[in-house]
Every structure is written in structure tokens, then in C-alpha cells.
Image: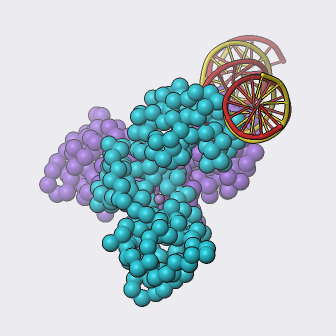
Chain colours: A cyan, B purple, C yellow, D red
Amino acid sequence: MNLTTAEENYLKAIYHLSDGGKKSVSTNDIAAEMKTKPASVSDMLRKLGDKEVIEYRKYYGVNITEEGKKRALQTIRKHRLWEVFLVDKLNFAWDEVHEVAEELEHIQSPLLIQRLDAFLDYPKFDPHGDPIPDEYGDVRARPRIPINEMEIDQSGQIVAVKDSSAAFLRYLDKVGAYIGARIKVLDKVEFDGSLEILVDQKKSIFMSKDVAGNILAIQS
Amino acid sequence: MNLTTAEENYLKAIYHLSDGGKKSVSTNDIAAEMKTKPASVSDMLRKLGDKEVIEYRKYYGVNITEEGKKRALQTIRKHRLWEVFLVDKLNFAWDEVHEVAEELEHIQSPLLIQRLDAFLDYPKFDPHGDPIPDEYGDVRARPRIPINEMEIDQSGQIVAVKDSSAAFLRYLDKVGAYIGARIKVLDKVEFDGSLEILVDQKKSIFMSKDVAGNILAIQS
DNA sequence: TTTATATTTTAGTCATGACTAAAAACGAAA
DNA sequence: TTTCGTTTTTAGTCATGACTAAAATATAAA
Ligand SMILES: [Mn+2]
Ligand SMILES: [Mn+2]
Ligand SMILES: [Mn+2]
Ligand SMILES: [Mn+2]
């Protein structure tokens, strides 16, 4: 069964909100994520239920099915491959790619994605550090923690961001906290949870707990 | 005023059928080109008329407006740039690109097209030899004639094809009549208009008048 | 256990873009 | 100028995906 563009977008949202199929998801949460009204979501849930990509029990949340998970991961794969293309080949900034990828991910052509993957040399992560599922939907996730959970004097490397909004990404550009940057926690303020971070062994920056919670690192 | 994907497709069809705005176009012809019913075309013409990209007088044909011409050329530009990308970068065969480009041409992002153009090194022609309009809609067309109109012993170079169907393009691949091939008309058969053509100074091939009429060359 | 509140679904509407069947208009031939 | 065949438009319907307002259900509080 084929999915429409709208159905693919909903399914992707449900996949993300359910934490990859682990939790069930509410109508209101989907409405908030999709910036639509709950009534519209109810309509769509019936359709997705009919197509058996979600399990839908009225008034209780929805759960994504195995088939649905597979479909969602295909769309996520396409989204992230296009993001790599835009940044690596067309010199887009990492805060400029999301909206365009949101359109490109719906182009229907398995050959296109296969060739794009090869052209990009089979990237494993997108410009925001998120893993790119392979064509079977397998994801090699890296163990990673928000840097506000790191201890003082611990070192690591920024590998991803939780928030991909343009505003947040531009802030990270400004302070030099790009993906791949080596960091060390110099200090943590008990009172408000803010941190002092050494970036690339040369620049010390302060950030709020809120900001730090959206930056993910692997420890070393 | 923004155009929907469907509106862009119709406008492009009208542009082509009108020979770049030179002739007016009938409802039935548009229906044939779009593989829809005349009734659906009537609906769409009213919408395109409201948006002032065509001039629509009921029961008489439609004429594309200057604004409509500009919009159609933008879409054609995007279509052809994507075709170049697919062939040059992703190693698609020239008979595999049309359908995918038909989807990609509707992605809304001026920045994307600008960057793609640069990435492809500002190509002037698509894989089928058709000229790529610049961002202002200007087209540098080459003077070209169907090779069945060439005289015996005349030489030239294949620069484009009229028919971009996969079947025709695969036939051309088979006989080596690719874009850029140097050709010489060895013989023309009066009776059925078929030709004998020398390709790249080494291979002699026969082709019907029908085939030859779909191959365009510049004379030299 | 009843009530109140929040959540969710249904009913009814709208826009887009397709279709069929029927009506209307055009244009050429009689 | 009337008729006839072709072209085109209109009327009515359907599917998709959105909306508002109202009804239904679930759940937490009294
Ligand atoms: Mn999308
Ligand atoms: Mn991303
Ligand atoms: Mn198209
Ligand atoms: Mn082409």
C-alpha cells in the first residue's frame, strides 16, 4: 500500500514521538508536532490504521506497527541523505536544510536514493549528527549524552544536536560548537545548572543548562 | 501568487503546446498532453485564468501570459537542471531521468536551484539537448534541424532529440546516436524517406524517416 | 460514585483536482 | 440559415486533507 506525502509526514512524526515505536502516542501530541488540529489528526489516524502502519484504538493512543516503523525509517533515511547532499555538495549551512529535505524526502524513486547514497559515499550520519538508517531500516545509533549530564573535567566530542531549529544551530555556529568539536567541561554552576565548556582546546564558552541539554556528545 | 504542483504541470504543458507562447492551445490538446479528461482541463483553466498566468476565453483556446511564460520557464529550468544532475552526478541513463525530474521540478527553494546550477557548473543544455533557461527565463536556443531534412553528404552534430521517451532513447543508445555524435548523411531513399547515416566516422546506420525526424542536429 | 475537566472523535464544511454524464456553444456543411 | 458533429463547459460526485463546532469518552477530583 502506498502512502501519500501527508501520510508519510504523520507517520514520521508518530515514529519520532513514540521514540522509535517504544511508547504509544496521543492525538494531541501529534497535533502539536504537526501543527494541525486534533480533529484533523483523528481523520488521519483512521486512514493510517486502515493501511496498517499504526494500531489505532479510539480514545487511546496509537502504536506504530512493524510495517509502519519500516516505512517511517525509509522516509527518515531519505530526509537525512538529502540533508547530507545539501550540506556536503551544495554548501548549505546546517540550519538551512531541514525545510527543503522535508520536501525532497517524498520523491518516489528507489534508484534515486540508492544512487544518492553511493554519490555521498554511504554517509552514516546527517549534518545534525543523527544516524542514517540503511536501506533495510537498520540504524547504528551511537551512545551519546546531553553535555549537561557530563561531569566536570570530562572530555568528549559533540556528535549531534537534539534541537535542529535554525535559531539554535546558528547560535552553535557562533560559539564554534559544531559537530565533531572536541569539548571539555570546565565548570558546572550548581545554582542554575549552567556550564563552562572548553571547545577545541582553545575557546571557553558559557552555556545555560537548556542549551547544553540540546547538545549531545560521546565521552572519551 | 503561488502555483500548486498540478498548476505548474498544466502551465508547463500549455507552454510547450503553444510553442513558447506563440500559438493558442485547445482544451482537448491539453487533456491529451496531461492524460486527463477535457472536463478536468476546463476546471483548471478557470483557476489558471484567475491567477493570470493564462488568458482564458471560454470555448476559444487559451493563451499564456507573460507572467505565465516566466513561471513555465522557471519550472522547465528546474526540470532540466535536475536531469543534468541525475545523469552527470548520479549516473542515470538519459532515458531514466524524466519521471524523477517531473517530481523534483516542484521543490520550492530558489536557493536550492541556484546552488544546484553552480554545482553542475552552469550547464546550458539538458541530457536530451534541450536548452536550460537562465534564472530570468532567457533561453539560448541553437539553430537545429531534424536530420531527415539534411542533404546527402552534409555533415553535422547531434544536439538534441524531439522524442524523449525511454524506448526511443534506448534505441539511440543501441545505434550510438548520442548527443554530441558527429554524423554525415550518406544516402537518402526517395521512396520512404529513410536515411543512411555515418556516425562518428566509423559506423554506418540505417534509420526510418520517422526516427530521423526526431533527431536534431546542427550543420557544419 | 458522581461530577468536572481535559482529551478525543464526529458532523458538517471547504478547497483541490480528478471523474462521468449531460448540456451548451462553436463552426462547417447542407 | 438551419442542421449536425465536434469541442467545450457545467453539474454533480468522489477522495484527500484541512478546518470549526458539537458531541462523546476518559480520567481525575470531589
Ligand atoms: Mn516531509
Ligand atoms: Mn537532520
Ligand atoms: Mn512535474
Ligand atoms: Mn529533458
Residue A186, position as x, y percentages in the image: 46, 82
Tell how many labels: 0
In the image, A215: left or right of B27? left
At 42% from the left edge and 59% from the top edge, which residue is drawn?
A: A130
At 41% from the left edge and 44% from the top edge, which residue is drawn?
A: A74
Foreground of the two, B204 or B15: B15
Residue B200, position as x, y percentages in the image: 19, 57
Can residue B58 be seen in this snapshot?
yes
Where is C30 relative to A57, above or below? above
Can residue B149 be seen in this snapshot?
no
Foreground of the two, B143 or B140: B140
Foreground of the two, A156 or B183: A156
The answer to which image quadrant residue A58 occupies is: top right
State the quadrant of the C terminus of chain A: bottom left
Residue D24, position as x, y percentages in the image: 74, 23
At 31% from the left edge and 63% from the top edge, which residue is drawn?
A: B220
Residue found at the very far left of the displayed protein: B202
In the image, B89: left or right of B130? left
Foreground of the two, A16 or A60: A60
At 47% from the left edge and 49% from the top edge, which residue is drawn?
A: A105
The answer to which image quadrant residue B44 occupies is: top right
Residue found at the very far bottom of the displayed protein: A202
State the quadrant of the N terminus of chain A: top left
Residue A177, position as x, y percentages in the image: 47, 76
In the image, A25: left or right of B126? right
Where is A216 relative to C23, above or below? below
